[in-house]
Amino acid sequence: MTTVDVMGRAAEAVESLSDHALARLLADSAGEVLLGLRAESGDLAPRQLKDEGDRRSQAHLAAGLGRYRPGDAVLSEEAGDDPARLEADRVWIIDPLDGTREFSEVPREDWAVHVALWEGGDLVAGAVARPAMGSTLATDAPPTAPEPVTGPIRLAVSRTRPPEFVERLAARLGAELVPMGSAGVKATAVLDGVVDAYVHAGGQYEWDSAAPVAVARSAGLHTSRIDGSVLRYNRRDPLLPDLLICRPELADQLLAAIEELTKGEAQ
């Protein structure tokens, strides 16, 4: 399925779409490309399916942005970095396939497509498509944060590489660990009410969190570094060491516990 096949259905209207709506359209249509690939994958080995998924989704998103926002810069996991983005006013930060492992393990659903826009120093629009779940969360229609719940705090954690830091944090808080796949799915699980927080301290890149953070903010969730400082994007080095996304009423408790934990490690 080509870019024209998927996006051509709305081609006449796309020119007038807001950045918010375009982020959703791009994420949704890339998701359709990836679902199509899964359906036709046949006997592809997991490694081949991962690589082809990255390639097709990247090509689709690059073509869409080139057609509908040709003057904007792009930072993508699957493309070489263009230093000119550092001088640009507008930069799309994309992860064409977040959770390649899960994507290759058909029929797993916990993988995503991330599309975010950075403008004037901050994230201004974003969409996280979860194609196999039939769900997209985006800033054009900000999701509603779930109601607070009682009981232990639930922390999203990697199903294959649960970080020791989060395990120690859970022990300190008496929290439950909920294993799941991609970064985007873990972050948006807070909005689904499946977990209460996503804490990551093992190092990520901007494309891993930009779209989830944009969507989480639009819903009123707390987003920050694990020391409480502001998340910054479109930096020279796109490595973003850590991240906290959580229900706003839990932010102080989580940040205090993280501070206690990190101070104890430093001693």
Image (cartoon, helix red, strand yellow):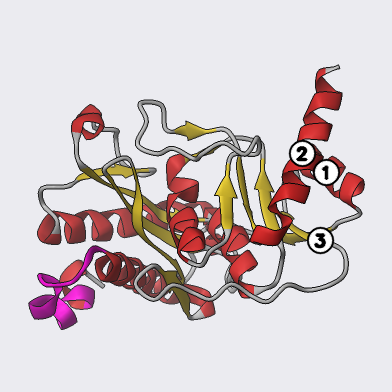
* Residue located beneath label 2 in the image: 258
Label pair 1/2, CB-CB below 8 angstroms:
yes
* Residue located beneath label 1 in the image: 169
Magenta stretch secondary structure, dominant? helix
Which is more toward the observer, 263 or 207?
263
In the image, residue 138 lies at what x, y percent? Answer: 41, 69
In the drawing, what numbered circle is on residue 214?
none
- Quadrant (top left, top right, bottom left, bottom right) of the N terminus: bottom left
Q: Tell me where residue 174 sits by quadrant.
A: bottom right
Q: Tell me, yes or no, if residue 180 can be seen here.
A: no
In the image, residue 253 lies at what x, y percent? Answer: 78, 49
- Using a 10 Å C-alpha cutoff, classify the residue at mark 2 as few (fewer than 14 neighbours), some (14 to 19) or many (20 or more): many
Which is more toward the observer, 26 or 254?
254
- Quadrant (top left, top right, bottom left, bottom right) of the C terminus: top right
- Up the image or down, 242 lies above or below 41; here it is above
In the image, residue 164 lies at what x, y percent? Answer: 80, 38
In magenta, the rendered stretch is 6-19
Helix, strand, or loop for circle 1? Answer: helix
Label pair 1/3, CB-CB below 8 angstroms:
no
Check if residue 17 falls in the magenta segment: yes
**What's the residue at 21%, 69% (across, down)?**
2
Q: Tell me, yes or no, if residue 228 can be seen here.
A: yes
- Using a 10 Å C-alpha cutoff, classify the residue at mark 3 as few (fewer than 14 neighbours), some (14 to 19) or many (20 or more): some
**What's the residue at 48%, 32% (across, down)?**
239
Check if residue 181 falls in the magenta segment: no
Instruction: Tell me how far mark 1 sits from mark 3, CA to CA.
Output: 11 Å
* Residue located beneath label 3 in the image: 153
Q: Tell me where residue 250 sits by quadrant.
A: bottom right
